[in-house]
Image (tube, helix red, strand yellow):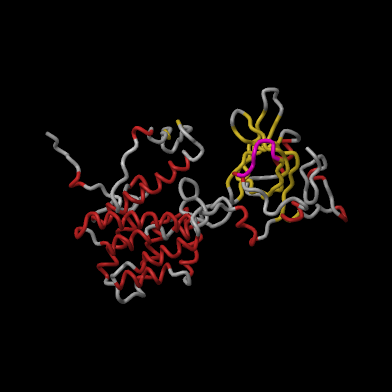
């Protein structure tokens, strides 16, 4: 491994490098590390086998391992806003392991190789770097959906709520000018399993609200649509305080101690008392939706759903999270089986498109089949 320029290098001199006066040399900034290499550096998805890589990454995890010849090597999970990349350090691994703890930022140069069908970066040069708060977005994954489109959808969903008290509460909590609203638009929906990126909470919430809207229309007058949509838009609002919007999306202290459901109940109760148009009985039903949306006690739900709107919200929320997670598992599978996923305790199968002779005629305008034209009981 070559000597790393600037900062505390990971080359032969490594942490023993000294600046003027004998003190540790100042860590390089992102642009100092990249020097003449492109900024921003290429996205993980754009890298191809054999490519030379120069980029800056967040160290999500590190593992010191040994080869069959009992030589130590370092395995790194390197992340930026485009995704993650596995890095391997073969030389001086033990010293570099101590140099770059999980949670640190590093500048890396190396070559992308494919081994046993998996891409990995053969690290040739590495050094800790300095990252300012304004640069953190370079290392945080972001929703693939454009923010402006999601904001318009949120505005339209809130405007569709005809109950004045519920609509006033939604504006008070989720308008872009409010502190909660700003955090809501930026927060992830989870630390790891689903929508774990900037804007993920907004993306997941809109998906859940849209699903609830469709089912409210399907089941008709039995369902209080305004109550259901409000519950869908606020069911995960506590996550703005449960999960820190920073590298690795760590849980906050109050998130660990209370969880997003209790935090959400606190937040909605505190804001609802300032909405005189919202009667106490409506507020109670809304709080029940938030308290019961996880659906099961073993899933840390304080209550199970006891109203129809609660049943819909729970199952739509669970479906959206699981479908998003399964879709990501299949993202790199063109056809056939995925890898085994421990959270689902199964593999998933991606089937191919229908053969030409199996293709169906286009549905009538509007997407629904013409039931009158179907001969369900032929002679």
In the rendered structure, the answer to whether residue 340 lies left or right of residue 313 reads right
Residue situated furthest right in the rendering: 21
* Position in image of residue 378 (x %, y %): 14, 35
For the point 46% across and 33% down, which residue is it?
Answer: 335
Q: Nearer the viewer, residue 79 or 144?
A: 144
Q: Residue 48 sits in which quadrant?
A: top right
Residue situated furthest left in the rendering: 379
For the point 81% across and 53% down, which residue is it?
Answer: 25
Q: Quadrant of the C terminus?
A: top left
* Position in image of residue 67 (x %, y %): 67, 26
Q: Residue 229 sits in which quadrant?
A: bottom left
Q: Nearer the viewer, residue 72 or 127?
A: 127
Q: Please name the predominant secondary structure of the magenta segment in the image.
A: loop
* Position in image of residue 297 (x %, y %): 33, 47
Q: Quadrant of the N terminus?
A: top right
Residue span colored magenta: 46-51
* Position in image of residue 120 (x %, y %): 64, 36
Q: Is residue 203 magenta?
A: no
In the rendered structure, the answer to whether residue 39 lies left or right of residue 377 reads right
In the rendered structure, the answer to whether residue 46 lies left or right of residue 99 reads left
Q: Nearer the viewer, residue 308 or 218?
A: 218
Residue situated furthest top in the rendering: 69
In the rendered structure, the answer to whether residue 134 lies left or right of residue 345 reads right
């Amino acid at each position: 491994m070559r000597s790393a320029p600037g900062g505390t290098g990971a080359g032969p001199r490594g942490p023993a490098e000294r600046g003027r006066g004998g003190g540790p040399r100042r860590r390089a900034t992102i642009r100092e590390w990249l020097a003449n290499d492109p900024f921003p550096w290429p996205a993980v998805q754009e890298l191809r086998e054999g490519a030379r890589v120069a980029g800056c990454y967040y160290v999500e995890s590190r593992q010191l391992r040994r080869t069959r010849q009992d030589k130590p090597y370092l395995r790194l999970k390197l992340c930026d806003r485009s995704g993650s990349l596995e890095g391997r350090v073969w030389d001086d691994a033990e010293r570099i392991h101590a140099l770059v703890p999980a949670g640190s930022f590093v500048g890396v140069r190396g070559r992308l190789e494919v081994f046993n069908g998996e891409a990995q970066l053969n690290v040739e040069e590495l050094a800790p770097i300095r990252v300012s708060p304004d640069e953190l977005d370079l290392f945080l994954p972001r929703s693939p959906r454009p923010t402006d489109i999601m904001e318009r959808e949120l505005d339209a969903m809130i405007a569709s709520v005809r109950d004045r008290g519920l609509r006033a509460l939604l504006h008070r909590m989720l308008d872009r000018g409010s502190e909660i609203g700003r955090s809501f638009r930026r927060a992830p929906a989870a630390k790891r399993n689903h929508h774990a990126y900037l804007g993920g909470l907004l993306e997941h919430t809109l998906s859940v609200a849209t699903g609830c809207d469709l089912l409210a229309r399907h089941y008709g007058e039995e369902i209080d649509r305004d109550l259901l949509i409000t519950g869908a838009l606020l069911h995960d609002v506590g996550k703005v305080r449960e999960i820190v919007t920073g590298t690795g999306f760590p849980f906050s202290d109050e998130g660990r101690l209370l969880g997003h459901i209790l935090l959400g109940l606190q937040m909605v109760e505190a804001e609802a008392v300032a909405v005189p148009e919202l009667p106490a009985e409506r507020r109670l039903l809304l709080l029940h939706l938030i308290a019961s949306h996880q659906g099961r006690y073993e899933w840390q739900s304080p209550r199970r759903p006891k109203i129809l709107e609660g049943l819909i919200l729970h199952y739509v929320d669970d479906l959206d999270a699981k479908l998003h997670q399964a879709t990501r598992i299949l993202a790199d599978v063109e056809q056939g089986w995925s890898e085994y996923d421990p959270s689902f305790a199964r593999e998933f199968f991606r089937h191919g498109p229908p053969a030409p002779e199996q293709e169906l005629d286009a549905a009538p305008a509007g997407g629904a089949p013409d039931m009158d034209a179907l001969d369900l009981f032929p002679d």
